[in-house]
Image: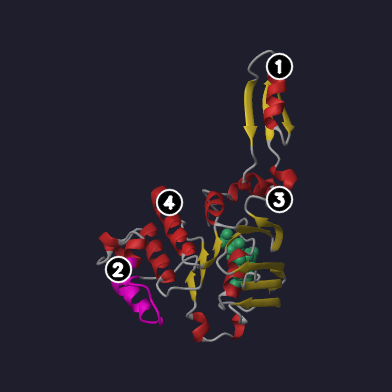
Amino acid sequence: MTPPETVVSVHELTKIYGSVAAVDGVSFEIARGETFALLGPNGAGKSTTIEILEGYRRRTGGEVRVLGADPSHADLAWKARLGIVLQSSGEQGAVTVREQLSHFASLYPHPRDVDEVIAAVGLEHKAGALIRTLSGGQRRRVDVGVGIIGRPELLFLDEPTTGFNPEARRQFWDLVRTLQDEGTSILLTTHYLDEASQLSDRAGIIAAGRMVGIGPVGEIGGRDARTPIVRWTEQGDVREERTDSPAAVVAHLIQRLGGEPEGLEVIRPSLEDVYLDLVGREHADELSGAPS
Ligand SMILES: Nc1ncnc2c1ncn2[C@@H]1O[C@H](COP(=O)(O)OP(=O)(O)OP(=O)(O)O)[C@@H](O)[C@H]1O
């Protein structure tokens, strides 16, 4: 079997603004067809990293290859293989949704069908509406449509579902799964850890410009961080035990206490629990539900 092709490779990337290291020695790789999530609190360095990979910002140091090229020297043909959904589009929108997507489609050699994309982002009923008359979440869907219209090999999604209602977020996840089935490689940043768990194969957690955890979403943080916790209340005190065999612990408890333990919970630490441990509790208020 041939090893998977690497579409993004980042080695010891740094970006210094004045005296601040916004990105401070970050390394990771993305294989073709993989979805990789970059997670971290506000100001951690995610957008700076993603914008360097897109060729929008110059790095201070380190090695970066994206689809075989150095983004700081790449050409238009390279750019046409990327799909980009920036954190904010700044789009004023004196054109309709269909006009906007048709315009971007005309810039690519093998674009998707405009009406298919409009349907995929759930804007059929707004196809003829001026973009400036759309809600924030609807405009975000236009941004996503622009990002995928060129049939990109590699798609950058920087906080794509900010402002989406829960139903729109689920629809967006379905769209991403379709793109994944077609073989698209994706780099995603999000403050919604459920979104990262649902969509990504692997994730990296950045805090203050440094990678503090990286791996498959189900394994990040290591085995100990993922060990289940059995929690119960006994004589007014909350007790807990970390164990690989929670059923045996519960059975033993029932026997010892002579019945149902009060307040019994079996907790399997989620990506969110591991994230909080890794970035520190002081960043907890910047978690999901409070995107930038
Ligand atoms: N043009 C700039 N000049 C100076 N400092 C900058 C500039 N752009 C970003 N920074 C700083 O770099 C750090 C990383 O910012 P970045 O936007 O990459 O964070 P982020 O992880 O994407 O955050 P968020 O989740 O809020 O989008 C922050 O401290 C930010 O203030």
Q: Secondary structure at mark 4?
A: helix
Q: Is residue 235 visible?
A: no
Rendered image: mark on residue 255: 1
Identity of the residue drawn at 63% across and 50% down:
218
Q: Residues within 10 Å of mark 2 (few under 14, many from 20)?
A: some
Q: Earlier in the sequence, mark 3 or mark 2?
A: 2
The CA distance from mark 3 to mark 2 is: 43 Å
Q: Which residues are magenta?
A: 93-116
Q: CA distance from mark 3 to mark 4?
A: 27 Å
Mark 1: few, some, or many residues within 10 Å (few <14, many ≥20)?
Answer: few
Label pair 3/2, CB-CB below 8 angstroms: no
Front position in the image: 115 or 290: 115
**Residue 256 in which image quadrant:** top right
- The residue labelled by disc 3 is 221
Residue 67 visible in the current orientation: yes
To which residue does mark 4 refer? 170
Q: CA distance from mark 2 to mark 4?
A: 20 Å
Element carrying mark 1? helix
Q: Where does the image place residue 88, in percent across and percent down from the top left? A: 47, 66
Which of discs 3 and 1 lies nearer the camera? The answer is 1
Colouring: secondary structure
**Label 3 residue SS:** loop
Labels 3 & 1 near each other (Cβ < 8 A): no
Q: Is residue 210 magenta?
A: no
The residue to which callout 2 is attached is 115
- Which residue is located at x 32 percent, y 65 percent? 118
The answer to whether the residues at label 1 and label 4 have Cβ atoms under 8 Å apart is no
